[in-house]
Image (cartoon, grey):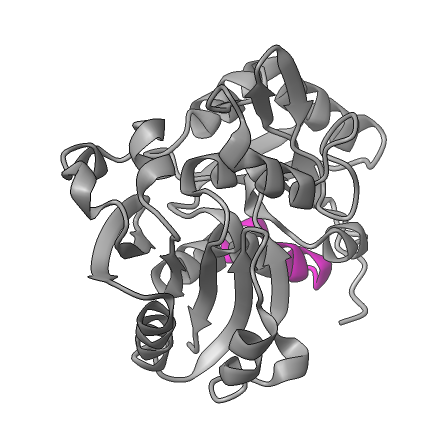
Amino acid sequence: MGLVSDASIRILTDSTADVPPDIARRLRITVVPAYIQIGLQSYRDVPWDSEAGPGLSRRAFYEQLPAMPVFPTTAVPPAYEFAAAYRRLAEEEHADTVIAIVVSALLSGMYNVARLAVQDAPHHLRVHVVDSGQVTMGLGWIVIAAAEAAAKGKSVEEILVLVEGMRRRVRVYAMLDTLDYLRRSGRVGWVRAMAAQVLHIKPLLEVVDGEVRDVGRVRSRRRAIERLLALLRSLGPLERLALLHTYPVDIEAFRERLGEFFPQEQIVTVPVTTIIGAHVGPGGLGLAAVRAN
């Protein structure tokens, strides 16, 4: 795992990828932050080993979310922030190619903004913008694999083929403590149509090809966890696995059970970006898995 890229290809993503900061630094992955608006205050979505803004960590965000008088809103960064990142990679890191892999275009305007910014990139820089069809570490695993391939000297064509293959093998599952936040966000059409009386049900969701799908509803957290494990078991052998959560939640017992499917020491634990957390709420658990090739 001691890869350090000296190639002329650089990988860029947005902060919803949830790439662990140490991995992003080691693989020289550029992360363009999204924004979250809480009342009159706007915060940059920064790596989860630092503060998300003045006095707001991810833990604090999730703990305060239920009592926030105004529902938080999220926003993509302006195009000039992507353009500035492209220029920096070309001028300071001497990249001749950037592969920008971003959150699902069906769930965010990030893809369109990243493409718009290409017109302000240096003329000699080739930029490939890729819709991952994924969120959080579903996107993150694709980004990490692409950066590892770039560090090994793979060509642009080889990396793009790898990314497309990863898209087909990545699965993201989530257990929400309530549907209320997703319903209020208005981002998922079928949630808006659900009756209010089912909001106390523990919903289970899957992200596939950029769409959020309902894969089950149970009446207790214990049953929801069992269902998550059953979904993971159905994938067969795994290549990568991340445990996702939105504070406050006890993850240790759940993490131990994941040892049935994947080596404990290789499981990455990720507190989910506030950008996604604003829509799913606190107390959530999830998995981002890559099926073995």
Is residue 265 or residue 82 the one in the foreground? 265
Q: Is residue 203 left or right of residue 60?
A: left
What residue is at 37 percent from the left and 77 percent from the top? Answer: 229
Left or right: where 176 falls relative to 51: left
Numbered range of the magenta stretch: 147-158
Q: Residue at x 58, y 61 (%)?
A: 145
Residue 155 part of the magenta-drawn span: yes
Q: Is residue 101 on the magenta stretch?
A: no
Q: Is residue 21 visible?
A: yes
Q: Main secondary structure of the magenta part?
A: helix
Residue 64 is situated, as x and y percent measured from the top left of the image, at 60, 36
As drawn, is 279 to the left or to the right of 35?
Answer: left
Name the spot of residue 155 as percent of width and height, x first.
Answer: 60, 54
**Figure disc tally:** 0
23 or 174: which is nearer to us? 174
Residue 144 percent across, percent down from the top left = 62, 57
Q: Residue furthest bottom?
A: 260
Furthest residue to the right? 92
